[in-house]
Image (cartoon, rainbow, N blue to C red):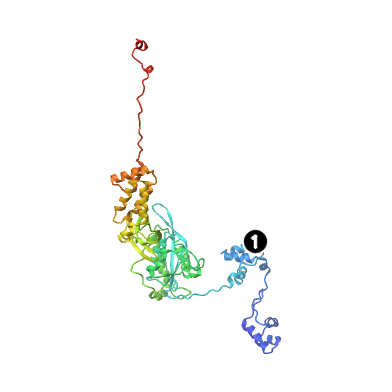
Amino acid sequence: MTKVRKSMAIQDEIKRLKQLGHSKSKVSKLLGINRETVRKYWEGPVDQLILDIPDWVKNLDWEYINKEINSKTPKTILFEELSENFELPSYQSFCQYIRNHPADDTKNKIVVRIERTPGDSVEVDYSGDSVQIINPATGEIYRVELFVGTLSYSGYFYAEFTYTQKLEDFIYSHTNMFRFFGGVTKYIIPDNCKTAVTKADKYEPQVNKTYQDMCVHYGIAIDPADGYSPRHKPNVEKSVDIIQQDFFPRIRNKTYTSLIELNSDLKNWLIKKNKQIMKDRGNTREYYFNKEKSLLKLLPEKDYELYYFKTAKVHPDCHFQHQRNYYSVPWNFVGKEVQIKYNSRMVHSFFNLENIANHKNLKGHGHYSTIDDHYPEEKIVEVNYHLSSARVRAYKIGEFMGALVNQMIKMDQFPLKSLRKVQGVLSVAECFTSKQAEYGAEMCLEYSRLTRSALKKYSNNYREIKEVKTLEAPKRQLDLICLQGGLDDANR
């Protein structure tokens, strides 16, 4: 049985009476405690408990037990497994010993309570559980995801179901959440999912560019939670638990055939839940939300419009390629990599965070969106290395190919605009012999079809003419001549 340590007040009193010159027996009488206790604390306070360790405790491998407990193995299962090989007391005594003697890596951990400031931060996360929706027409079953966002101060929370956790659904859930709150906080604390953080790092996490762009639009800073640390977003973790333990059981026997129907039930439940009194705070989430609502920053006039990001290299013709179409930028960015921000409507290009060009997103393939001011002055074009190189390559093939390339360069007001087409023609010419390419170029010029496909077609049609020479007339062989009447007639 454990010997209970005397309070620090008793220990201090023993020390004080000793300093006053009292003997151990006198101190024992004055304090009403036995002499053994006085002798124990006579030399000063005892820092550790003196334990009578039971035999069953000594027989167990506590390093293994603590490892299993830290990996979330239930104590009931551990108790059942250990009982097969060891004589253990009751399950309650087993659990009590574990509570009083936590693992070394957890018993000395210090947890600091973070004071939340109204309007300061919002935490977002996805629940690990999902709900099924049945398509009534096909009978196909879809599993939908649960997005949750919670204001750190008030605990006021928003939730909605989406088909996926992909970027589009993730961003639109944020837009709906901000509209539900009627404002935005200073900070947002997301989980380390790929849609928010492309590379998780404790000190320098890399945030998804679209997510960053959304936060710039709403004027909110990103503070990603550390990986595997729920304490950095405890409020949203708690909200997820509440939904799992309260809302999910209420709909367990209900069949949903649309996402709208499911989100409608969730919204009605949310309104009621935010109005319920919290036992630990003595008031409702709505009450605390009304306190911090005025401290939220106003929403922008327009909701965030989803954009994607990529990099592209600028070609010598002052265009970069995006989804098999071509968009121009100023000529001084030729050869450099630019950042592309795009969606279904617009294509924006940036260099070192500076916007250098904007275009409407072209439909189809092979089209050009060109701003004439992006081309250089004519004197710069004349000495352009790529145009000169194209002319040299063409004349090496033949005169017709050189003439074809020259005509293609001159056919546009801005010669560089034809550079990519010229390079395409030369790449086709290199697939044929010089004679075939020259014939193809001649036909292109004759029929005014200055295109890559026309050159390929005409070059394929080239056929070399073979000369047939007749040297002498064939000699007649008399023995092979058969006259009417046969040999006798011939002798006559």
Q: Is residue 477 left or right of residue 239?
A: left
Which residue is painted at 49% across and 70% down in the image? 232
Which residue is painted at 64% across and 80% down in the image? 6
Q: In front: 219, or 326?
A: 326
Q: Is residue 93 left or right of residue 407?
A: right
Q: Quarter holding the C terminus?
A: top left
Q: In front: 286, or 361?
A: 361
Please tell me in which quadrant of the rendered image residue 439 appears. Answer: top left
Where is residue 334? Give x, y as percent.
38, 59
- Does any portion of residue 216 appear in the rendered image? yes
Bin the neighbour count of mark 1 within 10 Å (Cα to Cα): few under 14, some 14-19, many 20 and up: few
Where is residue 16? Give x, y as percent.
65, 87
- Does any portion of residue 249 appear in the rendered image? no
Q: Which amino acid is tagged 1? A: Glu
* Residue that carries the numbered disc 1 in the rendered image: 84
Where is residue 476? Give x, y as percent.
36, 20
Q: Residue furthest bottom?
A: 20
Please tell me in which quadrant of the rendered image residue 15 appears. Answer: bottom right
Please tell me in which quadrant of the rendered image residue 63 appears. Answer: bottom right
Which residue is painted at 38% across and 52% down in the image? 137
Q: Residue furthest front?
A: 471
Total marks drawn? 1
Above-or-below relation of 370 to 95: above
Q: In front: 127, or 112?
A: 112
Above-or-below relation of 463 to 240: above
Q: Secondary structure at mark 1?
A: loop
Q: Quarter holding the N terminus?
A: bottom right
Where is residue 284? Give x, y as percent.
43, 73
